[in-house]
Amino acid sequence: MALSGWPAPPEVPRPLAATLAQLAATPDDAPEVEPLLAAIAQLTADRVGPVDYASITMLQDEQHVTVAASSELARAVDAVQYEAGEGPCVQALAEAAPTVAPDLTTTMRWPAFAAAARRYGLTASMSAPLYTGSGECVAVLNMHGRDLDSMTPVIHGVWLIYHPSRPLVSSRQPSPPLDDGGQELLAGLSQAVAVRTVIQQAIHLVMARDDCSARDAYLRLLADAAATGQSLLGAAAHEAANEQRDGI
């Protein structure tokens, strides 16, 4: 709180958090999706101290593709996983769930990926799902770090965003506190999950009201948004408000 007579301190820009939340509210086929993904990869590497390299994996024509990366090393690590058909990014995209490699110095999982990661000096990695407006996991954010201790709280924190009632079981427990960038990453992912929840609730309301599929309900929300000049998130919030009003 600002002292009386003194101006309030300026808000610290949080572009990573804002971009993650924006992606979750963006229609699946909007042209902004890939630029947002590219920004997320670069901002993650630039702003989250423990994350030395970041990239984005998508499926295109049933092939894994790196659509954005903070460096060529990140692309190389992805390519090893695509060729082997296994690794954190491949599994995270298939399961639409976070996948972790919390200690690459000892892991026996994904041998091709782990060996390549160690050659590149990486000690920990994780991949986290990213959503667009329909709620589908369209991509995963891959994060790699060279310092095991500093990556540990990032991995545990991201995991809890997606599994709040199921803490990550790991031999390593977070010790150093998250830096500002790590806190921004968690805030952005939390906001993205919250946005997705609002839109999903509206989709289910439309499904129940109109007796239609989830896909059709999503398309009807998009049509409502366009007809009323609202965003998809705005149309979803309006749908929920109408339901609450009608239920009173």
Image (cartoon, helix red, strand yellow):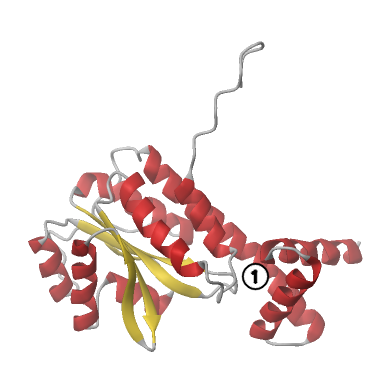
Q: Is residue 73 left or right of residue 247?
A: left
Q: Quadrant of residue 122?
A: bottom left
Label total for image? 1
Quadrant occupied by the C terminus: bottom right
Figure check: 168 above or below 10: below
Could you say where residue 88 lies in the image, as x and y percent from the top left? 29, 70
Nearer-the-camera pick, 89 or 156: 89
Q: Residue at x 47, y 56 (%)?
A: 161
Taking 188 as reference, is 100 above or below it? below
Q: Quadrant of residue 160?
A: bottom left
Name the residue tied to disc 1: 200
Above-or-below relation of 117 to 81: above
Asked if 224 appears above or below 11 in the picture, the reply is below
Q: Quadrant of the N terminus?
A: top right
Instruction: Give the amino acid at mark 1.
Output: Gln
On the image, the x and y values in percent for residue 47 come to: 35, 45
Q: Is residue 36 left or right of residue 206?
A: left
- Left or right? Give the position of 82 relative to 165: left
x then y, percent, for residue 17: 49, 50
